[in-house]
Amino acid sequence: MDKRKFIIESLVESSETKIAIQHKCMDSILSAEKLLVNTFKNGKKLLLCGNGGSAADCQHLAAEFVIRLSHKLDRPSIPAIALTTDTSNLTAGGNDIGFENIFARILQGLGAEGDALIAISTSGNSPNIIKAVETAKSKNIKVIGFLGGNGGKLLDKIDVPILIPSHNTQRIQEGHITVGHILCELTEDELYGSKQ
């Protein structure tokens, strides 16, 4: 393997994916930001779920909302919960009711009508994310989907799908965290930017 060539190709592919996001995801990102702003203005919260690297993205983005992303703003905390961080719930759920049910079960207990869910799946076919989305819909929780490729089975189940235009898992994940940062910064600015 030519390592230098590999590095250059990876960086170019990453850059090209982000440029494609600009052209193909703009309306979805703006719709997601509007949904989040309305959720928080109505005193509701954001929940997030995903597997593996997407689970880490859930925790990362929840922290950005709760603490802050932009250091230009001195703002109150925005309520966001990563459903991926409670090892007792995750392991009990996986052991007792099956891994495919873990996020749906937590949503049953923590989700409320008017909340929002960010469901992250690079393939759009993760069984536990599909069940979580179905549970969210049954509770009148609006769903933003961070997806990739063709969107998989989740594409038609999501209120606001953000489909990263790539079939490479790494590029999709990079797109997800970039879009998550954009959404957080837009949302906190809309809620609190004019108050500075």
Image (cartoon, grey):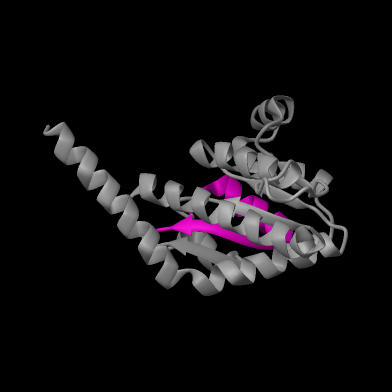
Could you tell me which quadrant the N terminus lies in?
A: top left
Residue pictured at 57% horizontal, 53% vertical: 180
Give left or right: position of 155 versus 135. Answer: left
Q: Is residue 167 visible?
A: no
Figure quadrant of residue 113: bottom right
Residue farthest toward the right in the current orientation of the protein: 43
Figure quadrant of residue 60: top right
Q: How many marks?
A: 0
Residue pictured at 60% horizontal, 70% vertical: 30
Residue 177: image location, x then y, percent: 52, 48
Task: Check if residue 135 falls in the magenta segment.
Answer: yes
- Viewer-proximal residue among 98 and 162: 162
Figure quadrant of residue 188: bottom right
Residue 20: image location, x then y, percent: 37, 65
Could you tell me which quadrant the C terminus lies in?
A: bottom right
Q: Is residue 89 above or below residue 12?
A: above
Q: Which residues are magenta?
A: 125-149
Residue 10: image location, x then y, percent: 26, 45
Give left or right: position of 171 versus 64. Answer: left
Task: Check if residue 139 falls in the magenta segment.
Answer: yes
Residue pictured at 86% horizontal, 64% vertical: 42
- Viewer-proximal residue among 36 and 135: 36
- Viewer-proximal residue among 34 and 101: 34
Give left or right: position of 45 versus 180. Answer: right
